[in-house]
Amino acid sequence: MSLRTLQPRLQVTSLRTAKPAPKRADPFYVSPEWIDLRDRVRREARGRCEAPGCGRMECRMFVDHIVELRDDVTAALDRSNVWLLCGSCHSLKTAAERARRTAEVPGGRSV
C-alpha cells in the first residue's frame, strides 16, 4: 500500500488567518443625546468611579448603564440609570451581569 492512498482527499483550512469582523459602534452610542449625557455624567462624577467603596480615578473610565439596555431600553437616557465606573469596577459589573444572565437561561446558554 502506498502512502498516497492514505492522504486526506480534502484540504484542511487554517483558521488562524480568519479575521473577525470589524467592531461597529451601536448607533445609540454616537447619538448627540448619548454624548451629551455621557459628558454630563463625567463632569458630575469629577472623573471618579461611582461604584460603592471605590472612588478611583483612571485614564480609562466607562459611562455605564446601571440597568442594562437589553433589560430596560426606556431608561437609555435616564440620568439616574447611568454612572461612571473605573475599568476594574466595569469589568466586575459586566462579569456579574453575564453570570446572572447565563444562570437565568435554561441549559446555561448566554443570550
Image: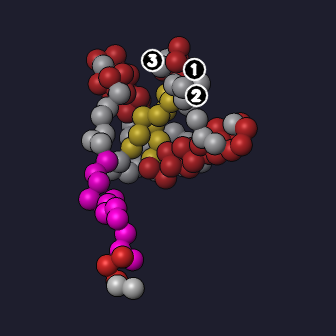
Q: Secondary structure at mark 2?
A: loop
* Residue visible at 57% across and 48% down in the picture: 95
Q: Secondary structure at mark 3?
A: loop
**Vertical placement of 41 versus 95: above or below?**
above
Q: Neighbour class for label 2 at 10 Å: few (<14), some, many (≥20)?
A: some
Q: Which residue is mark 3?
A: 77
- Label pair 1/2, CB-CB below 8 angstroms: yes
- Residue 67, label in figure: 2
Q: Nearer the viewer, residue 51 or 35?
A: 35
Disc 2 residue type? Val
Magenta stretch: helix, strand or loop mostly = loop
For marks 3 and 2, the one nearer the N-term is 2
Marks 3 and 1 sit apart, C-alpha to C-alpha, by: 11 Å
Q: Nearer the viewer, residue 15 or 94?
A: 15
- Tell me if 54 is positioned left or right of 9 in this view: right
- Label pair 3/2, CB-CB below 8 angstroms: no
Q: Secondary structure at mark 1?
A: loop
* Residue visible at 30% across and 42% down in the picture: 21
**For the N terminus, which image quadrant?**
bottom left
Disc 3 residue type? Leu
* Residue visible at 58% across and 35% down in the picture: 111
Disc 1 residue type? Asp
Q: Is residue 97 among the parts visible in the rendering?
A: no
Q: How is the image coloured?
A: secondary structure
Q: Which residue is mark 1?
A: 72
Magenta-colored span: 6-20
- Tell me if 77 is positioned left or right of 16 in this view: right
Q: Neighbour class for label 1 at 10 Å: few (<14), some, many (≥20)?
A: few
* Residue visible at 34% across and 16% down in the picture: 33
